[in-house]
Image: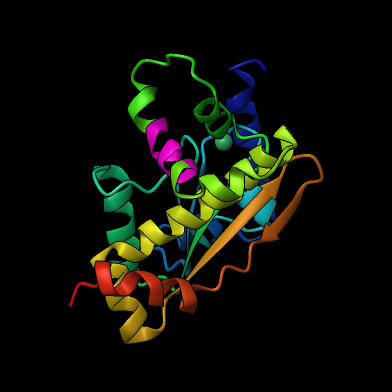
């Protein structure tokens, strides 16, 4: 990819949008009112808006390596607070993906420097679900399952935050766990039963 072609692409994109609606950008500049917060992986193959078929203004997006939600990560915590408390999104989505390099790296013992503490959160997911994961003999299937369980645990981390709990009680905010399959292009809803999950964690993590 030629870096200079980016500006050419941008000029074409602006022209295309304006051809359909001359007020497109001036309308966008008035503000945003997205109904979804999407938390996904930074992987270049998992293009949030494109795979969901949405455009500017539709989704508030946060991406990091392996779609993690860590309570000591100021960035993801700020994004969640802003989206839930101020933008009042109706849905929070954590979207993982098969073939995730971050999840793969957490399954290996390679020293990755500053990435070690970040990926250690995924190793914690592995530890929590060790019995299930170790019963899967096919390594590729175990890798896929860890991707799914990581999404589930990050959704739980979303639910542990005070703003999300408040919005859940007050206005029925919902949390969703999805996986994007790069090999087929399909988006899969893990259909996590959050009522059940919540019952299990609320006695420990509830914030009134
Ligand atoms: Co990834």
Which quadrant does ligand 1 occupy?
top right
Q: Is residue 159 visible?
A: yes
Q: Residue 161's quadrant in the figure?
A: bottom left
Could you tell me residue 125's position as x and y percent? 45, 45
In the figure, 29 relative to 121: above or below? below
* Main SS class of the magenta portion in the image: helix
Instruction: Give the residues in magenta.
Output: 119-126
Q: Residue at x 60, y 26 (%)?
A: 6
Task: Give yes or no for residue 125 being in the magenta stretch.
Answer: yes
Q: How is the image coloured?
A: rainbow
Task: Give yes or no for residue 131 being in the magenta stretch.
Answer: no
Q: Residue at x 41, y 70 (%)?
A: 89
**For the N terminus, which image quadrant?**
top right
Q: Is residue 17 visible?
A: no
Q: Residue at x 61, y 41 (%)?
A: 134
Could you tell me residue 194's position as x and y percent? 49, 73
């Amino acid at each position: 990819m030629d870096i200079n072609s980016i500006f050419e692409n941008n000029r074409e994109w602006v022209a295309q949008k304006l051809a359909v609606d001359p007020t497109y950008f001036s309308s966008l500049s008035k503000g945003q009112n997205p109904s979804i917060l999407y938390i996904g992986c930074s992987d270049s193959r998992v293009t949030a808006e494109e795979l969901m078929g949405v455009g500017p203004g539709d989704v508030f997006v946060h991406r990091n390596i392996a779609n993690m939600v860590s309570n000591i990560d100021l960035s993801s915590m700020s994004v969640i607070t802003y989206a839930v408390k101020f933008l009042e999104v109706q849905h929070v989505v954590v979207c993982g993906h098969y073939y995730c390099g971050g999840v793969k790296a957490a399954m290996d013992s390679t020293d990755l420097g500053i990435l070690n503490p970040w990926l250690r959160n995924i190793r914690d997911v592995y530890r929590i679900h060790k019995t299930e994961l170790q019963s899967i003999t096919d390594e590729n299937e175990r890798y896929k399952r860890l991707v799914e369980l990581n999404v589930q645990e990050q959704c739980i981390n979303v639910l542990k935050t005070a703003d999300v709990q408040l919005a859940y009680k007050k206005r029925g905010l919902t949390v969703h766990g999805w996986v994007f399959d790069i090999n087929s292009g399909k988006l899969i809803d893990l259909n996590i039963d959050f009522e059940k999950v919540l019952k299990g964690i609320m006695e420990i993590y509830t914030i009134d």
